[in-house]
Image (tube, rainbow, N blue to C red):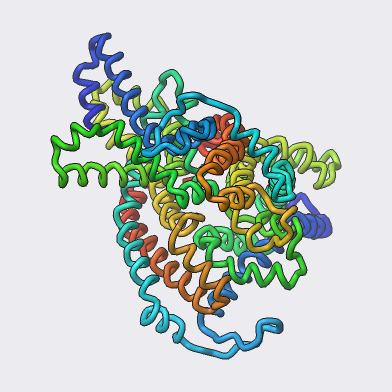
Amino acid sequence: MKKNLLSSAARRREALTGLLFISPWIIGVCVFFAFPIFRSLQLSFVNVINMTDYKVEWAGISHYKEIIQTDTWYVKHFLTKCREMLYQVPLINIFSIFIAILLNRKFKGRTVFRVVFFLPVILGSGFIMSQLVSQGVQGEAMETAQNVLLPMEVKIFLGEKATKFVTDFLTIISSVLWKCGVQIIIYLSALQSIAPSLYEAARVDSATEWEMFWLITFPMMTPNILLNLVYTVVDSFVGADDLLFKHIQNIGFQNSQFENASAMSWLFFVWAILLVGIIFVIMRPFVNKVRE
Amino acid sequence: MKVTKGLHLRLGRFHLTISASRVFVYLLVLLMVAFTALPLIYVISTAFKPLDELLRFPPIFFVRNPTLDNFRDLLFATSSSSVPFLRYVMNSVFVAAVTVFLTILVSSIGAYSLVKLDLPFKGLIFNVIVATLMFPTTLATIPNYMVINSLGLMNTYMSLIIPKVAGAFGFFFVKQFCDQLPDALLEAARLDGASEWKIFSRIVFPFMKPACSTLVVFTFISSWNDSFAPLVYITDDAMRTLPLALQSIGSGATLARAGAMAAATFLSTVPTIIIYTIMQRRVIATMAYSGIK
């Protein structure tokens, strides 16, 4: 409709203004994201001969081979991380939905709790957190806290194996809870955008809370669940306290092995993409059902 | 939770049980809060510990005789490194403020033009954004260093600011919000002869304010906490930001410094917590409106 109203000169002017408006962003993405991503992929397949004028020779998959065959540290931690992600990604999302539902209820002090659950995002992405970790503050804090939760008498009563099981369990829960911040917010917003009239109608038909969750809340949230699963996978690769990330940066910046470092990050990315693909395949039938 | 809800409903006819379920909610939330907030509580409590409590082993969780010694130590005694702590704070504030300002300007004006203007290659640009969301920034770090280097931006504040401005996340987010701006409003302004810039600054930007305040939170946090960029790009000690200052305080590594370290950590988390607390409601509301689905 708009197009009929405007003359071609006016449309061209609009296109020009539009390009002018969006160009800072496009230039930024090209220079600091698209190009670097492309360059790092390229780096993982070449040998750099001269860094200053970027002279390279094709190396094929030799860097990937070298990593898998010689860098045992990386391979070991890579596999551990892959295994961890398999249970952490679903756990993080289950916890986030759970917490989001709790935080969506009306109770006093809700704001404070919402901030507290976001704390890990405020701290966790940053150096502060990695400092805490490296200084053992988190470990110390967890230990002292666990001593409060699990007094010595209880430990003796439970015996060594059971105690280890309980503390391991607590450690996993706290490490999962620390990664829930953004996901909780996305689920909270999803919960708030579900029309209350749906629940009212269900209540009139005497549905239980349990039924309402599976027949209203869950189906309405599937797009957000998909989004969050993907986000969790991609996000698990970022973070200053991530061991793999640190290792890659060390290889890259301290040993100046840019090629190997790039190959390592791409190896991990392939795994992440694979996981995202699996998530899409599993989630697709659920998400489609909602749209129809 | 599923169990809770079932339980709650079966007993739900009575008044007493409603409060019981509320107590249950509180307990559950408190338990999880305990897990999430413990390290921070520990840091805060450590920041106020006097020397003898810092040295105690095994460490105690809560401070017994709080003191401000650690803060005094931090603000006045760190001058031994020739750069006062406040200088780092100012660096961080400056870098974060400029990053936030530029990010919002670039994202909102770009999103407006992508959504509402007759732009060539619209579909392509949008696909690029979605694809970009899938790539972790980690992949780009090493070539980014080369780019910064060849642009001659090493050891400048710009190297901490510019690479962060054009992010896919913020752009996508603002764009989703901009989709809801009614076209009629823009048409009316155009008929009245308003320029595109005027339309943007008078109509579009005010409309997008909630989305932008969310972007403020995320951009500020990521800039404020970033330790990687200053570590790699900045060589001049006086230009470094807080996270690195924390590192150099921490590298003193004697137990006595643990107090100053905790004080510094505490001080440097306060701004982000305040900003999020203020904006919290808006963040959740925008996410709901922005149709991230």
Instruction: Give the residue at x 33% y 48%.
Output: A289
Q: Quadrant of residue A98?
A: top left
Q: Provide residue A101's location: percent of width, then percent of height.
A: 37, 32
Q: Quadrant of residue A163?
A: top left
Q: Residue furthest top?
A: B15
Q: Provide residue B38's location: percent of width, then percent of height.
A: 41, 35
- For the residue pair A161 and A67, the one nearer the viewer reads as A161
Q: Is A74 left, or right, of B202 in this rendering?
A: left
Number of numbered discs present?
A: 0
- For the residue pair A117 and A128, the one nearer the viewer reads as A128
Q: Is B237 left, or right, of B8 in this rendering?
A: right
Q: Provide residue A141's location: percent of width, then percent of height.
A: 40, 39
Q: Quadrant of residue B36?
A: top left
Instruction: Give the residue at x 40% y 77%.
Output: A71
Instruction: Give the residue at x 73% y 44%.
Output: B84
Q: Is B237 left, or right, of A105 in this rendering?
A: right
Q: Is A180 left, or right, of A121 in this rendering?
A: left
Q: Tell me if residue B199 can be seen.
A: yes
Q: Tell me if residue B175 can be seen.
A: no
Q: Provide residue B232's location: percent of width, then percent of height.
A: 64, 63
Using the image, determine if residue A107 lies above or below residue A64. above
Using the image, determine if residue B16 lies above or below residue B187. above
Instruction: Give the residue at x 70% y 50%.
Output: B81
